[in-house]
Amino acid sequence: MSAALLAAVAGALLYGSGTVLQALAARRASGPGVLRHPWYLAGLGCDLLGWLASLVALRALPLFTVQALLAGSLVVTVLLARVVLSAPLRRVDGVAVVVVVGALVVLARAAGPESPARALPDAFTGTVLGALGVLAAVSVAAYRRGAGWLFALLAALAASGAAICARAVTLPAGAGTGELVRAVAVEPLAWAVAAFGLLMTVAYARALERAGVGATAAVMAVVEVVVPAAVGLGVLHDAVRPGWPVAAVVAAVLALGACVALAASPATTATGHVPVGPAAAR
């Protein structure tokens, strides 16, 4: 197993664990005290480490592989919530867990070799920044009265934007720390990762208020895989291993369907949070 694939798996484990730790803190404290509880802080630490792991994975693996593996954090959440929070586990949840794990194994195998660095299309950066502006404008306009599903969609699109930018950003190879910091400081796509992450955080919180955990998790699981996968394959030269396209499509559909089922699980609802992809610190 490659280091990048291990990083993606680690990211899913960390995201799922962080969600349950934060839910555990919410059960043992109330109000602002939750934010200071050791379990909540530990959950934030897991989120941060998961995000860093996802960035490592995105540097080498296709977007569809990384995003699908991170969506699999729902499996971790459901299983840990059963043990730690005593959340009920439905029979369909058990089936969905098996389906997700099997589908993710196929998707990992279907990932093609790392594509050589290629120049981005001329309009790529401008298009991404324009999309960021549109999402921000819609979020502001709809903030007071917008429907929950709209904010779930906005959060998922913002998370997708962060993943796409993280995959597309070009940094100097073999650079020292100082040179790397300077390169990031002048790279618009690097700043866009943080901006998309901030937008995702705001929209995600609003979605939980108005749509609930299950609906938000379902939208996030689907959009965060489909949109980055389409951009990765169509624009960023991501590749599927020869002979594996059909298997990859079938596995992706099964994984998404199973993730939607897990999003409605009592175990997911019990956490009060939705594990999402590499959208920067949440």
Image (tube, rainbow, N blue to C red):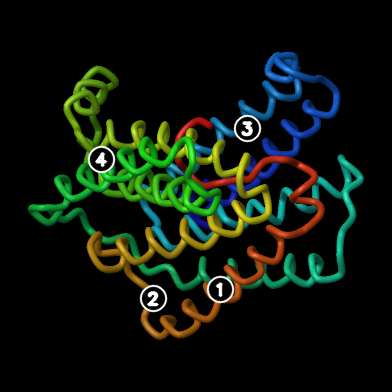
Do labels 3 and 2 touch, CB within 8 Å? no
Amino acid found under the numbered disc labelled 2: Arg
Residue at mark 1 to residue at mark 4: CA–CA distance: 36 Å
Looking at the image, is mark 1 or mark 4 nearer the viewer? 4
Q: Residues within 10 Å of mark 1 (few under 14, many from 20)?
A: some
- Give the Cα distance between marks 2 and 4: 35 Å
Residue 162, how many percent across, how many down?
Answer: 37, 43
Label 4 with label 3: CB-CB less than 8 Å: no
Q: Amino acid at mark 3?
A: Cys
Q: CA distance from mark 2 to mark 1?
A: 11 Å
Q: Residue at x 78, y 28 (%)?
A: 26
Which residue bears the numbered disc 1? 106
Q: SS at mark 2?
A: loop
Q: Which mark is residue 154?
A: none
Q: Which residue is mark 3?
A: 46
Secondary structure beneath label 3: helix
Q: Is residue 69 left or right of residue 193?
A: right
Residue type at numbered disc 4: Gly
Location of mark 2 (residue):
241
Q: Residue extending furthest left?
A: 122
The first of marks 3 and 2 along the sequence is 3
Residue 108, can we see it? Answer: yes
Q: Residue at x 48, y 77 (%)?
A: 248
Q: Nearer the viewer, mark 2 or mark 4?
A: 4
**What residue is shown at x 87% (from left), y 59% (from top)?**
89
Using the image, determine if residue 18 lies above or below residue 207. above
| Image quadrant in which the N terminus is located | bottom right
